[in-house]
Amino acid sequence: MNVKEKSLDFFDRIERLSGFRPIICLLISLACRKLVFRGIFKKTINSATSFDVIISNNHMEYFDQIHEIINLVSQTYKVGLLFEGNERKFDILLKEKFPQSILLPINHRLLPGLSTRIYLSSIAGKENYFPKCPKKVFYFHGLAGISGFKTNGMNAYSDIFCATLYQQKQIASLYPKKRSVIVGYPKLSKVETLATRKIPESNIRVLYAPTLRRMLPFDTKDIFLKDLNILRSICQAEKVEKVFYKPHPQEVRDKGETFFINLINDTRTKEKKLILDLETSQSRIFNCSDILVTDYSGTAITFALKEGKPTFFVAENVDYLAKLNPLAILLSNIVNSYEQLSKAFLSASFFIKNFQENRDSALVIHKEAKEKFVREIQDILDSEFSL
């Protein structure tokens, strides 16, 4: 481990121990700018002193959610992109996906030294490392509500871009003084309402994609055992040909890839259908899966709406699920144990009653979401306040 890596590891520990106290984060930011990253920070400042928009996130998927929006805005405005975290392994990917934007190959603790007219992010509770700007905009990276987000995590944002009416109602209740607008979910912007897919009678491919368990407000017990049981239950269904296991990207970072490789190997001793998927993008795995199974992840709703395919929630706490994402009740099959999941897979039909009608109704709000999102950014940039 080199000096830079040791410093970042030290800063991580100090932040956690201090509870991310503002004064501590300020000192860490200054130390990064003056000592650890002095050369690269100076180079970044010299190449781009000010931006129209800076977008930073700690998951590639959060950038992918607004992929077309970033490229459209970059045609007219100066856009900087930063992948948060200590590692820079995603910088090349960002540069390839968004060639018209400016890559910021720096640690997120250097952001307070940059200035921009809009700061855009899908991360709550990172206000200690915001850049200098008049407008700080949060956008939802999914369709679920705000349960599981850090308490008061959006306090420092000035504007909230909501994907659903339910999200906006929650924001209005918790942050009544903030400006919130419904832009819809960009990934569903062009989805046809009559595209429900027919599930094959055999050789079914199932995707299991659980949520980030440490963010749930209750004990999820043994994650290894829970996932093992669910995966085995799916594998043992006669109609199933393949089972894709896609753990949450942050959970992979927390526990390490070895944890999930071991889990897969334990299951593979009896089940040869299982495939571990650690790619950051959802698109490919969505396309080649017929059914999605999760516990509380809102990605199941995206799958049902975008792909027109059935989903299952294995949720012991159904009340929490209904509060987290009301659409789960309308669009998904819900069971509270892996034993019930096994029985459900014996059913001849995987679609819930009125799925088509509920799906068509839910998609209306997302029509032209991409265009609405871009217009909101343009309106802020063109307003007198941000000049």
Image: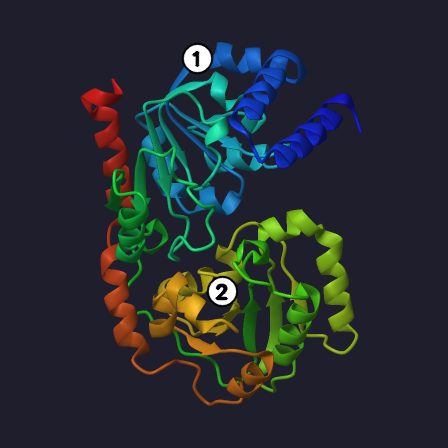
In front of the other: label 2 or label 1?
A: 2
Q: Quadrant of residue 192?
A: bottom left
For this orientation, the residue located farthest to the left is 384
Query: Few, some or many C-alpha atoms within 10 Å of disc 1 (few <14, some 14-19, many ≥20)?
Result: few
Which residue does the image show at 32% across and 47% down from the upper left? 174
x and y, in percent, of residue 245 in the image: 62, 65
**Residue ID for mark 2:** 296
Quadrant housing residue 72: top left
Of the residues under marks 2 and 1, which one precedes in the sequence?
A: 1
Other-residue count near label 2 (Cα within 10 Å), few / some / many at <14 / 14–19 / ≥20: many
Q: Which element carries disc 2, helix, strand or loop?
A: loop
In the rendered image, residue 141, in percent from the top left (x then y), is placed at 41, 49
Residue situated in front as seen by the camera: 42 or 75: 42
Quarter of image, res 24: top right
Q: What element carries label 1?
A: loop
Q: In the rendered image of this protein, does residue 237 appear above or below residue 317?
A: below
Classify 130 as above or below 344. Answer: above
Q: Residue 49 carries which label?
A: 1
Viewer can see residue 105: no
Residue 102's disc number: none
Residue type beneath disc 1: Thr
Which residue is painted at 46% across and 90% down in the image? 348
The N terminus is located in which quarter?
top right
76 is higher (above) or lower (below) than 174 = above
- Name the spot of residue 111 as percent of width and height, x first: 50, 23
